[in-house]
Image: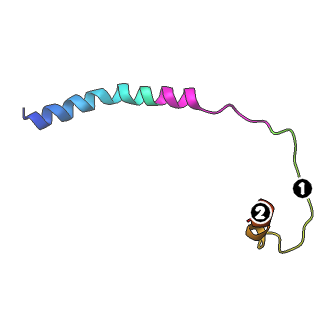
Amino acid sequence: MSVIREEVQHRRNQLPSATEQVRERLIESAPAERHLPFVASFEAEPDLAERHEEILRSDMGC
């Protein structure tokens, strides 16, 4: 068997182990589920969505 084939076979044999390690790390680092205790709604002028960047800039002092 060629060196390249041996390397490919070696890497392929390592995949299940590597996949399991990634899965474990993702589970460990997953953020806890958030429960937001509120729902908010409000009334605003009709062009609020269109002006959101301008409003945010003024609120940030830019």
Residue at 37% from the left image edge and 28% from the top image edge? 18
Q: Is residue 50 left or right of residue 14?
A: right
- Rendered view: 54 above or below 28: below
Q: Residue 38: horizontal and vertical position, in percent?
A: 87, 43
Residue at 76% from the left image edge and 60% from the top image edge? 60
Figure disc tally: 2
Where does the N terminus fall, quadrant-wise?
top left
Residue at 73% from the left image edge and 68% from the top image edge? 53
Q: Is residue 61 magenta?
A: no
Q: Is residue 34 magenta?
A: yes
Residue at 70% from the left image edge and 33% from the top image edge? 33
Q: Quadrant of residue 62?
A: bottom right
Query: Could you tell me the amino acid type at mark 2?
Result: Gly
Q: CA distance from mark 2 to mark 1?
A: 25 Å
Mark 2 — residue? 61
Nearer the observer, 11 or 51: 51
Mark 1 — residue? 41
Q: Residue 56: horizontal and vertical position, in percent?
A: 76, 63
